[in-house]
Amino acid sequence: MELLLEIRALSLSFGGLRAVSNFSLKVEPGKIYGVIGPNGAGKTTLFNLVTGLYQPDSGEIIFRGINLVGKKPYEISRLGIARTFQNLRLFNDLTVIENIQVGLLHQIRGLWRGILNIGITNNVDERIITLLDLFELGSRADEKAGNLPYGMQRKLEIARALATQPKLLLLDEPAAGMNPHEVLNLVRLIRDIKDRFGLTILLIEHQMRLVEELCDYITVMHFGEIIARGTPVEVQGDPVVIKAYLGEEEVG
């Protein structure tokens, strides 16, 4: 099967600190891949490299046959990659519907032109209505994003990312701060959007239940390096992973 994304020998250092070291990953379309590891393992740095916020010291990032190295974040977005962030990055003073419109208009005009044109655009695109319904945000459409409960803010950030119509969605700790009930609902939602929109998903997560339920394959990072990869069952049983990250109590 043709790969959607291939990362080849990617490395990045900050001063004397090697944040990502010789990282490689092959991503097939239609799958969900997890990247796990302790805090400081290099996971978010990896996402920043894929989305153009950082440029690597060496290596390649091939997406749909195009090398992303050297491209700007907006160029990468328009090629079909969207992301969420570990720390929420919503426009808190814009309404729910306006936040989603930013994602949609970003594809057409660019980020700041999209924001400036929000008030001029009176027509609500059918895709926005679909996203509001899917994420159960319709009743909150005219509320400011900053006033939403935390779990809804998380969902809104995913909805805004989907408005860019990505082929690859990067989720950085989507379950952070959620209670067990919210995590269970998030699992269902991620499965739904993957199937409905034909997505491939790459996610970072510490909630191992979510990772086990969703991911087809897992890559484990530690101090910027890959220490294991495989299915959730294979990774959980790896003694190197148990020692570095999961802990004895997590296995069994």
Image: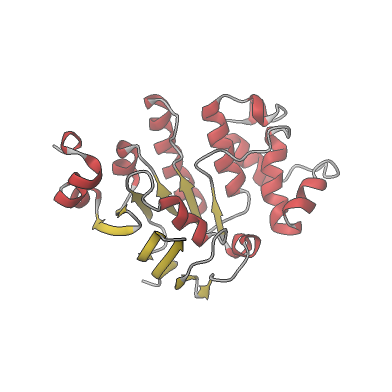
Q: Is residue 120 or residue 195 the one in the foreground?
A: 120
Residue 36 versus residue 61 in the image, above or below: above
**Residue at horizontal 44%, vertical 57%?**
46
Give the left or right position of residue 211, taking residue 250 as reference: right
> In this rendering, does residue 198 appear at all?
no
Residue at left offset 57%, top offset 32%: 153
Give the image location of residue 146, x and y in percent. 65, 28
Name the residue: 82% across, 47% down.
Answer: 116
Residue 241, position as x, y percentages in the image:
21, 49
Instruction: Name the image quarter holding residue 80.
Output: bottom right
**Image quadrant where one finds the C terminus:** top left
Image quarter of residue 33: bottom left
User: Does 51 sit above or below residue 208?
Assistant: below
Tell me: 195 left or right of 219: right
Can residue 171 be seen in this snapshot? yes
- Judge left or right: residue 67 versus residue 104: left
- Residue in the picture at 49% in, 48% down: 196
Where is the N terminus found, in terms of image quarters?
bottom left
Q: How many marks?
A: 0
Q: Nearer the viewer, residue 13 or 88?
A: 13
Q: Quadrant of residue 227?
A: bottom left
In the rendered view, tell whether residue 185 sits above or below residue 243.
above
What colour scheme does the image use?
A: secondary structure
Q: Position of residue 68 (x, y in %)?
A: 54, 70
Q: Nearer the viewer, residue 77 or 100?
A: 77
Which residue reaches farthest front? Answer: 16
